[in-house]
Image: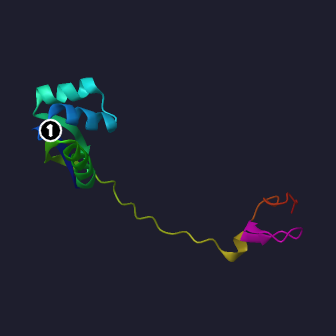
Amino acid sequence: MTKKYRVLFLGLVENEEAFKKRMSNLGVSIPTVDQMINKAPVILKGGMTLREARQYADAVQLAGGKVNIQEHGLFEEPETINRSLHIKLLEDFIMCPECGYKQLREKACVKCGYWF
């Protein structure tokens, strides 16, 4: 299992107008930025890997915000499936006498359509 992380916005490091402008450049609407500032501390985004959380936090910090990355759960990792490898026999293949294409046995060549 892999840990999940979230980014928590704690407040401003720089002035409000500069922060709003920089966050707007990142694609965040001004009303959303106002809510972030007024409701701080607030969770900005969750359910991320540590790498994603760091990238997200770095962007907000460069805009002038103070953030914290918190661990908050685990990702379920997909089960590893051990399947045996089935290798086709040489007899399962045929070469088209018309175009020379090698393929699994069929009624016709998948490349040129020649009927065997």
Residue 87, horizontal then vertical, whole percent: 58, 72
Q: Name the residue under label 1.
A: 9
Q: Residues within 10 Å of mark 1 (few under 14, many from 20)?
A: many
The residue sitting at 77% across, 70% down in the picture is 94
Determine whether, in the image, residue 107 is placed left or right of residue 43. right
Is 54 above or below relative to 23? below
Residue at 17% of width from left, 36% of height from top?
43
* 79 in the magenta segment: no
* Residue shown at 12% from the left, 25% from the top: 38
Which amino acid, mark 1? Phe
Q: Residue 12's x, y, as percent?
A: 12, 37
Mark 1, secondary structure of its residue = strand
Residue 114: where, in percent of width, then height?
A: 88, 60
Read off the magenta span: 93-104
Q: Nearer the viewer, residue 101 or 47?
A: 47
Toward which corner of the image does residue 32 lie, by quadrant? top left
Residue shown at the point (23%, 32%) measured from the top left: 20
Q: Which x, y percent locates residue 89?
A: 65, 74
Residue found farthest to the top? 31
